[in-house]
Amino acid sequence: MKKIRNFCIIAHIDHGKSTLADRLLEFTKTVTNREMQAQLLDNMDLERERGITIKSHAIQMNYLYQGEEYILNLIDTPGHVDFSYEVSRSIAACEGALLLVDASQGTEAQTISNLYLAINHDLVIIPVLNKVDLPGAMPEEIKDEMVELLACERDDIIPASGKEGIGIEEILNAIVERVPPPKGDPEAPLQALIFDSTFNSYRGIEVIFRVKNGQIKKGDKVKFMATGKEYHADEIGTLGLVQIPKQVVDCGDVGYLISGIKVAKEVKVGDTVTHTTRPAQEAIKGFSEVKPMVFAGIYPVDTSEFEELRDALEKLQLNDAALVWEPETSAALGYGFRCGFLGMLHMEIVQERLEREFDMTVITTVPSVQFNVIDTKGKLTKVSAPSEMPEPTLINWIEEPFINAQIITKSDYIGPILNLCMDKRGILKNQVYLTAERVELQFSMPLAEVVFDFFDKLKTISRGYASLDYELAGYEESDMVKLDVMLNGEAVDALSAIVHRSKAYEWGKKLCEKLRELIPKQMFEIAIQAAIGQKIIARETVKAMRKDVLAKCYGGDISRKRKLLEKQKKGKKRMRQVGNVEIPQEAFMAVLKIN
Ligand SMILES: Nc1nc2c(ncn2[C@@H]2O[C@H](COP(=O)(O)OP(=O)(O)OP(=O)(O)O)[C@@H](O)[C@H]2O)c(=O)[nH]1
């Protein structure tokens, strides 16, 4: 155990975590040059394309330090706020953390929130000033910031560049010298923290864990304490570039376990593995169920593909335990599924994976948060779809989820950010100057206002100099109403939304305008109306098309006609017929484009 170091890299998104990790793996010869692909740890295509780390991964390196061999377990963590629970579990598996700060950007919201998580878990922090090669780097200013933030010595900060390979050896040495070896009692009953899982279509779910106490042997009978399920440890081992099967994974080490688990839901990040005989008295602290924050309907464009969609969602769920769904029906869209996501990024990823990996063409409806509706009899119902909202006369009150948001920005942008947050029904709770120029603003804000486009707006008004982090604070009473949309007098349930009363008029007006732009002209006039209950609050009209598309080709050659028809057919792929009106997919997401 004396020779093991478990560490993670924490950083704000894009501060260069994956690139630096690649350099560490190269330097320790964990991977050969030939195996080296850029951003090795991001092994999902989607991750690489989007340049983000979605899931945490772990990898073991051997490092020779002063003639002795050390095992360094690097636990990679996701950088996006949607996946912050996974960050917290990864941190719980470590004794130390490299805190990367981009030398041209400085500390950002996630730098700070991750740092707090690490400090709460008593991790030793190794400050790294990354990307020092950038022409725009401001090493001295950013070092000042880091010294102030961490109360560390200036000399403790290691200047580095993942891109140029600067500072890599210093970082590895610092890990051995500054990060303490794992504590824990090898003789005690087994306690291993699950901090990740991966899906392999041949071998089932692979559980990634860190042994806190005791040890695990191949063939052991084990129990997952949160789910109560029991398995055989068919195969265990450590994680190099590939899995390395072992007979024993010792106290303090990081490893994987394969035991024929087929469903991701049985493996909960944060759960504790123990032995069935001589079990641990209690689980490792800090486990909580991941809860979806954003809900939306997903429908097949082609109604006959409902079963295929179910199949695809089931398969996706195998390796995405955070995804939840249940069947729902919509008058407008037919049979589909109500899905719960960790956030908007997670939702986009699921939609993209459905299309890429399963070749499904889907329509996603207006995303919504989950409200508490307390009816006149005092009963509480969780409502995450407008269609589930009871009649207003049956509602006593409605509560909506609020968050505590931290925004870090330059002082120049405080004014516009305050305006934006107030417009989003936020209340400023605190304002702290981190340095003369950088300020942290803390707001209480409804989650519903943040999930859609808040982040983009924040970036725009601050020219990129603002970062955001948040956590759920709880539910508060709010004056919410259901806003319906009608096309030619027919309500289209998939376009309804639950909005705050103070915003309903503006919302209705803008939504109607947007829909007018998005719904193509058809053979007849289309009235677009927004209503609260019986009351119409906005109206727009899509004028009728003047001529048939084909009329243009009158007398023209047949191949052109065919081309036009084919083009129309293609365009139709993502159209849904509601009543007599054809609605394109974009219309269902129109709310996201309302400014
Ligand atoms: N100039 C310079 N660019 C770097 C350096 N390290 C990373 N980058 C670039 O910064 C961008 C983000 O790097 P990543 O390593 O993907 O950042 P990350 O923190 O892993 O991002 P997430 O996984 O999404 O949180 C990429 O375009 C890299 O090429 C560096 O040391 N110098």
Image (cartoon, rainbow, N blue to C red):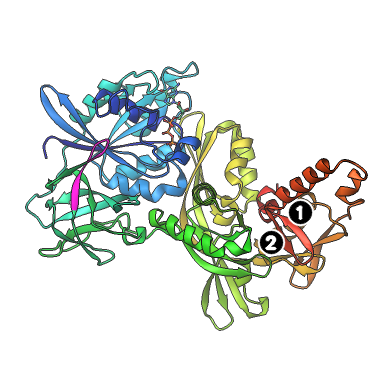
Q: Residue 495 got which mark?
A: 2
160 to the left or right of 495: left
Q: Is residue 81 above or below residue 497?
A: above
Query: Is residue 361 shown to the viewer in this render?
Result: yes
Secondary element type, mark 2: helix
- Quadrant in which residue 189 is drawn: bottom left
Q: Position of residue 382 (x, y in %)?
A: 52, 70
Circle 1: element type: helix
Q: Position of residue 437 (x, y in %)?
A: 51, 29
Residue at the outermost front position = 558
Quarter occupied by the N terminus: top left
Is residue 508 placed above or below 113 in the rendered structure? below
Estimate the spatial distance between the alpha carbons at disc 2 and disc 1, rounded to whole Å: 10 Å
Q: Does residue 237 belong to the magenta stretch?
A: yes
Q: Is residue 557 magenta?
A: no
Q: In the image as oriented, which residue stretches furthest toward the left? A: 187
Q: Amino acid at mark 2?
A: Leu
Task: Check the image and report above or below for 239 versus 308.
Answer: above
Asked if marks 2 and 1 touch (Cβ < 8 Å), the reply is yes
> What range of the chain is rendered magenta?
235-243
Quadrant location, ligand no. 1: top left
Q: Quadrant of residue 66?
A: top left
Q: Which residue is mark 1?
A: 515
